[in-house]
Image (tube, rainbow, N blue to C red):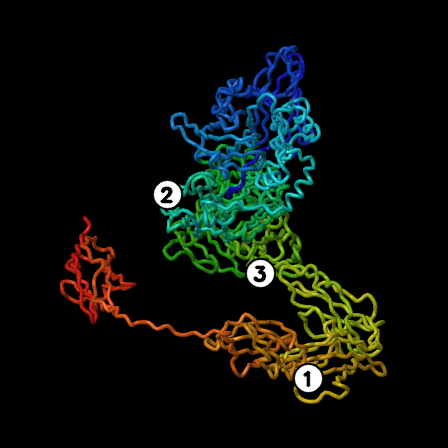
Amino acid sequence: MPEPGKKPVSAFSKKPRSAEVAAGSSAVFEAETERAGLKVRWQRAGSDISASDKYSLAAEGTRHTLTVRDVGPADQGSYAVIAGSSKVKFDLKVVDAGKAEPVSAPAPAPTEAPGAPGEAPTSAPEVEAGAPSPEAPGDPIGLFVMRPQDGEVTVGGTITFSARVAGASLLKPPVVKWFKGKWVDLSSKVGQHLQLHDSYDRTSKVYLFELRIMDAQTTFAGGYRCEVSTKDKFDSCNFNLTVHEAVGPGDVDLRSTFRRTSLAGGSRRISDSHEDAGTLDFSSLLRKSSSLRTPRDRLEAPAEEDVWEILRQAPPSEYERIAFQHGVTDLRGMLKRLKGIKRDEKKSTAFQKKLQPAYQVSKGHKIRLMVELADPDAEVKWLKNGQEIQMSGSKYIFESIGAKRTLTISQCSLADDAAYQCVVGGEKCSTELFVKEPPVLITRPLEDQLVMVGQRVEFECEVSEEGAQVKWLKDGVELTREETFKYRFKKDGQKHHLIINEATLEDAGHYALRTSGGQALAELIVQEKKLEVYQSIADLTVGSKDQAVFKCEVSDENVRGVWLKNGKELVPDSRIKVSHIGRVHKLTIDDVTPADEADYSFVPEGFACNLSAKLHFMEVKIDFVPRQEPPKIHLDCPGRVPDTIVVVAGNKLRLDVPISGDPAPTVIWQKAITKGNKVPAGPAPDASEESGAGDEWVFDKKLLCETEGRVRVETTKDRSIFTVEGAEREDEGVYVVTVKNPVGEDQVSLTVKVIDVPDAPAAPEISKVGEDSCTVCWEPPAYDGGQPVLGYILERKKKKSYRWMRLNFDLLRELSHEARRMIEGVIYEMRVYAVNAVGMSRPSPASQPFMPIGPPSEPTHLAVEDISDTTVSLKWRPPERAGAGGLDGYSVEYRREGCSAWVSALPGLIERTSLLVKDLPTGARVLFRVRAHNLAGAGPPVTTKEPVTVQELLQRPRLQLPRHLRQTIQKKVGEPVNLLIPFQGKPRPQVTWTKEGQPLAGEEVSIRNSPTDTILFIRAAHRAHSGTYQVTLRVEDMEDKAQLVLQVVDKPSPPQDIQVAEAWGFNVALEWKPPQDDGNTELWGYTVQKADKKTMEWFTVLEHYRHTHCVVSELIIGNSYYFRVFSHNTVGPSDTAATTKEPVLIPRPGITYELPKYKALDFSEAPSFTRPLVNRSVIAGYNTTLCCAVRGSPKPKISWFKNGLDLGKDARFRMFSKQGVLTLEIRKPCPFDGGIYACRATNLEGEAQCECRLEVRVPQ
């Protein structure tokens, strides 16, 4: 039986064999692999062999060769060849040049001694059939610790082959299979001659598997193979069995005569199918056998009949041997003749009903295997793949009901898919059980993925059943576990994973997971690594003790980087901090000092990219100011018009204004809502002018204190700092700072611009949907964030998925994009991002779901079916490609020759593949075209090759009379008549029906005509409908005629005037006349029956009798008979028969019988018991009976009593009386049923009675 999973197989189709070569010569070993391109390694003593002066390695396609030059004693030892997970070992033996033998394999083992027929022979290097070679090194790949070796045995002997497998590293026991030849699985042959055993040694952790062959026959000789497999490893070993016969002097060794010639060079056959190797020389074998015979002890061929009987009973594998033994040289002719002989099946002596050849059951259900035995008491054993099934829980249930034996297998799984046998003594019957697995459905499909080169890819899919067998495909090609381990497959319950460790550009494509019940498809897009900078770092100018922040944003949030200062890596400390959050990398320097002024750079790891900016340190110089100095704002800008200050939304807005004045001026901050419209803020309510300074400001027409909201002002003697935490779009505008003291005032306007990422665009619109593409259009965002939009990023996903996949890495400059590489029939959604110098906006709302679907191809085989003066009938076939959504219908258009405008023949679409186009101008030449439509629109049209002239052609009328209507049509009375006659003719012919030259009349016969046929219909036929019908077809002055003969038949009437013409001896002569009505058909004959007057049971005497007179013989003398005759025709016998009126007596000639006179005798007798009742002791709960026998005349009346009480009305007692034997049955007696039982017989002559005691015991 096949394994549920994929069976591991050997990588070699031809394996190298051990060789024995002379010293100084070269040794050549050859191996062939199953497929080309497989990596092959050669080893010696566990070490790899490389090409050198000593060793030569060659590979050509699937053929691989190892050559050992100038062989010496040092080269002797064990070698191995490895391909994938398969390893084959072989030996090289070096001998002196004078002793070398021209063979490439070890010499065969010596023949077994005749005195030990039951022991296995031993070869020179081995002790037993399974002993390992002492020079065998450790096997790093193979599973065998000891391999089975070649063996020899005599006919009738026993031999055991052993294989040992290391189990220290195995989680589960290995699976071992034994084969004969290439394909014969020996597990199904277990029985009288073959046994399989296995055991496990816990001390050495070695599994022992044995193949035991008993009572060996010559047919057992040949090549065998042992295969062992685990979850991830496989190994096999070949060995041979030789069976010897004892050959006496002068006798012919038919086995050796029958043996095929070996390969060239005398070497042992090396193919697994070596039983078929070599050639057979019929003539030489026959000459050899004849020359070896002696006149005294000659082998005589049996007779030809015996040869065929032997062949009929022999298996096909014995045909050649029998043919040689009996001198049959034409083997092919023998097989042909044997094939024509019906082979007698040997009836089973142990089974009355065997197992069926095969059974099938669904997974999870139960199956019953039942046999019926010839001996109900026979012992039965059930085997599974050659191993006896033991009672274990509720899995296997054994039942025995009479001669029936049943094996019930519950909750069938794939492990129960095997060969089963029922063994009774030495006979067995076999069957195979096939477990049908339900289709595996996909519960969660694959999702599209977009990765960069070198990234890890993992596809995940969930199916409906754990441990289900699935296939992974890429672009329709199945994926396998290659040596490079490119793909890794993982199962986790119902989840299946496909893992690609490092993706390359070649890995892009469509991946599919296929199960027995469906398929999931997803696309993998692999892009080259490319880093985009959404926000670069900018130059900063800060003062002493301030904070400097460099920030940048890149496209990949997993990218790490290094910060450099003047080209050297910057080491973070308590003052310098480096952070990485998502795509944003930030460098923060607290308490800036003059030493921090330098060039700073950020270098992403793995990309040739460098982001640089400069930090300027602003040193505040304080000059001596005399007292009573008017206030002044010191800005480093020409014309007292400062540059616009740009800040990114979310960052801190810091306006640092140096001031001077004596006394200390009051600083007022205000924001102009409109240009020239400023709202100054008054002094604080609790501040006094003598205090020397005031800190008040107006922000957006709102008076704020220092601790309110996001706004903060810090004012010192020489500067005023205005700070807004987390700048927003509303913070943009013109800020006015005013300083004043009693000496004067100064004022400066600062323009602040807040830039941000753009707003999310509106939902994109989908148009021009094709087979695998569509066009996506969108509008710019309502707000660009204060910076021009650099481009857009487009993403898509499947409707039922949650993973969005980016479609472009380079920004899209246009407001539309053609998306490609989509899967037809899958529903998608699109969304878009806007990108400016600050960064990327939030995603737009998803587009309306859409399905890529291409228009259908053009319809095929457009043809004109029929033409009339105003109509044209068209027909066509569906297009070869309909698209994933199916067809919505067809549109038909036409145009006149010379015109360019196409006119629709019918509004809307039609679903049929034919159409009758009406209302066409007569005589016009018209072209027609047909398009197929689906969700994607109309496909390309198919057009008639030439214009069609709208004009009905004149066609001669012609009746196409079917063959069965050309002969007499017979119908039974009451049957319907439906005669359909096709015809041709244009214009539409006129059809006329007549009967015997007269028009048809009456409502019983109806005529139905169509453009192509005419029908004569009679619902229930009568005899009057018989006759000759004529149909006439006329077109203008042309016509065609046909005649039909209808014969309505019925049963005949009975014969007339039946008479007894003569009676003599045992015979009676009858005569009659034919029936008056023959049923309108020929009479087939008569049926004559007779009936005895006593019983009146009718018996048929003659059937299908053609004459109107007959003689009825073999009548019984003294009986009186009636006779009757039926008439027969095609319909059947007549409903009634003609019967003789008076019985006919068959008299006894010349014999008078006198009744004897007997004396009346009186047989009256009083009842008496010929066998009385006997006392009984029975067990409670089991039915019991009391029996006795009585005689008497007249028949006596029987009564039964218990302890004097009549038992006649008690339902628990049944009474029987047959031929004087009386029986009382007591149903399931209890102890209370014990007592004195009596049987009384009474008639007119007297009375008799007998008694017995019944004891009912309770079982202990």
Q: Which is nearer the eye, 56 or 973?
A: 973
Earlier in the chain: of badge 1 and badge 3, it is 3
- Position in image of residue 960 (x %, y %): 77, 74
Please name the residue that numbered disc 3 is placed on. Answer: 849
Residue 433 lies, in percent from the top left, at 49, 47
- Identify the disc placed on residue 1025: 1
Q: In percent of the image, x 63 and y 51: which residue is there?
A: 790
User: Residue 817 placed where, x, y %?
Assistant: 66, 55
Question: Please, what secondary structure does the residue beneath circle 1 have?
Answer: helix
Kindly indicate the quadrant of the structure image that contains residue 697: bottom left
Q: Nearer the viewer, mark 1 or mark 3?
A: 1
Q: Which mark is residue 372?
A: none
Q: Secondary structure at mark 3?
A: loop
Are discs 1 and 3 less than 8 Å apart at CB? no
257 w.r.t. 495: above or below:
above
The residue at the far left in this view is 1204
Q: Is residue 758 left or right of residue 1235?
A: right
Disc 2 crowd, CA 10 A, few/some/many (<14, 14-19, 20+): few
Is 1247 situated left or right of 739 in this image?
left
**Mark 2 highlights which residue?**
391
Residue 79, how many percent across, how many down?
A: 58, 21
Of pointers 2 and 1, the one earlier in the residue sequence: 2
Amino acid under disc 3 = Pro
Viewer-nearest residue: 153 or 473: 153
- Is residue 167 visible from the viewing direction of this image? yes
Sequence-earlier tag: 3 or 2? 2
Q: Check the image and report above or below for 96 versus 925.
A: above
Viewer-side residue, 1008 vs 460? 1008
Q: Mark 2 belongs to which amino acid?
A: Met
Residue 541, relative to residue 1093: is it above or below? above
Closer to the observer: label 2 or label 1?
1
